[in-house]
Image: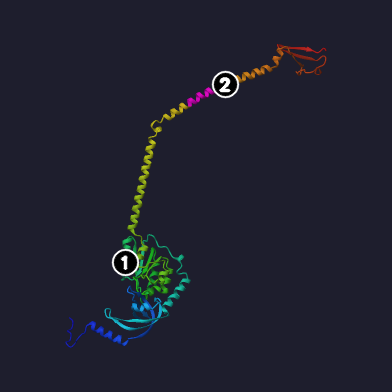
Amino acid sequence: MFPTLPVTVKPQTVSALTAQIKTLLEESFPSVWVSGEVGSLVVAGSGHVYFNLKDKNAILPSVMWKATAVRHRYAMKDGQEVVVRGRITVYPPHGKYQLTVDELYQVGLGDQDQALRKLKEKLQKLGYFAPERKKTLPSFPQRIALVTSPSGAAIRDMLQIISRRWPCAEVWVCGVRVQGTGAPQEIASALDRLNGFAGIDVILLGRGGGSSEDLAAFNDEIVANAIFASRIPIVSAVGHEIDITIADLVADRRAATPSEAAELTTPDRMELMQTVHARRQRLHDLLIAKYQFAKKALKNVGQRRVFASPLERVRDEERRLDDLDERLQKAMRSRLQRAGVTIGSLASQLESLSPLNVLARGYSLTRTVPDNKVVRSVKQIAKGDRVEIIVADGKVQAKIIS
């Protein structure tokens, strides 16, 4: 049981105490000049600007109302080194004090922002950001590793999306701190350990957003080295739309949020099933159409006359052969008749030119004996030579006497 409150105690309400603190602080610090680095800058829809002023050891929440922010023509951004004049105020609903800024002067880049830029330049020269070295994400991962806080909202979102989109994947959770002292070392160690296992297809590294100070672990060089050395594709899902961390630049793929990272690394099984069903239906329709076309073509072929009367074509060809044979016989007979007439005419011509016909008209042919040379001149023979005289009905032997 709780002890009894003494009757002499007169407690005051939280509001009353806060009002006293508010009065004390605001009267003690009506106007102060503060230098620091801008961080966690947010421009609200109302036009008010909320940010932190910070150095290596402390953070001072600050606000610049719209009327003051409009007077400043240059754009504020995280990492700027500024000097501001304002007053300390207390916001009772949150129970915290803040600096209400009335004037702001830009001095330069903050120490942290300069260090971050130098690290980016160094890693870029070493090729950490080169697109050609980035690995392709697997289309159908079988084993996915999550490197994130085991108690944050990011892991719940990623597990929910992966189980809905691609439930066949095996998910490994490697819990690490994602901010604060020791967080970079834990993240780098987790990545190194996962690369020692076989069968991990992709690693999702991330957290559920936060201020620029909260993202410091993902801007650490040790984390960049671990991502660069990883043989497994890594998706960086820091969950901050404005700031792009070094982890985002070195990773093989950047996602704006852990939920988007889970979607990038997993196919949607419902979409795949719809695609498979659509292609199956298309294949079915194509096969049916091809079957109907072939069936119609076969029916048309079966209705052709050649199949209805298969011997008709043969009979037609036989009839054509008979006609050709008859024409050939007629042509041969006509050719023989014309040849006979031609031969008779030539025979008559030869007969009229035959020497025998000449002999029949009373002429004779004289040849020497025994060499049978036709005597065409008296110079061919001499007295006493024997000759052969050929007449129409025979031959006679004679001797030259004169």
| Observer able to see residue 165 | yes
**Quadrant including the C terminus:** top right
| Mark 1 element type | helix
Magenta run includes residue 171: no
* Residue corresponding to mark 2: 336
Residue 46: x and y in percent read: 32, 74
Q: Is residue 382 above or below residue 180?
A: above
Along the line of sight, the residue nearer the viewer: 334 or 175 = 334
| Observer able to see residue 58 | no
* Residue corresponding to mark 1: 157
Question: Mark 2 is on which residue type?
Answer: Leu
Magenta span dominant secondary structure: helix
Q: Locate residue 202: give its quadrant.
A: bottom left
Mark 2, other Cα within 10 Å: few <14 / some 14–19 / many ≥20: few
Give the mark, 2 or 1, whose residue is nearer the N terminus.
1
Magenta run includes residue 326: yes
Question: Mark 1 is on which residue type?
Answer: Asp
Mark closer to the observer (2, 1): 2
What stretch of residues is rendered in magenta? 321-340
| Mark 2 element type | helix
Along the line of sight, the residue nearer the viewer: 139 or 347 = 347
**Exactly how many numbered labels are in the figure?**
2
Point 23% across, 84% down: residue: 16
Mark 1, other Cα within 10 Å: few <14 / some 14–19 / many ≥20: some
Along the line of sight, the residue nearer the viewer: 238 or 326 = 326
Q: How far apart are marks 2 and 1 (CA)?
A: 108 Å
Q: Locate residue 1: give its quadrant.
A: bottom left
What label sits on residue 280 in the rendered view? Answer: none
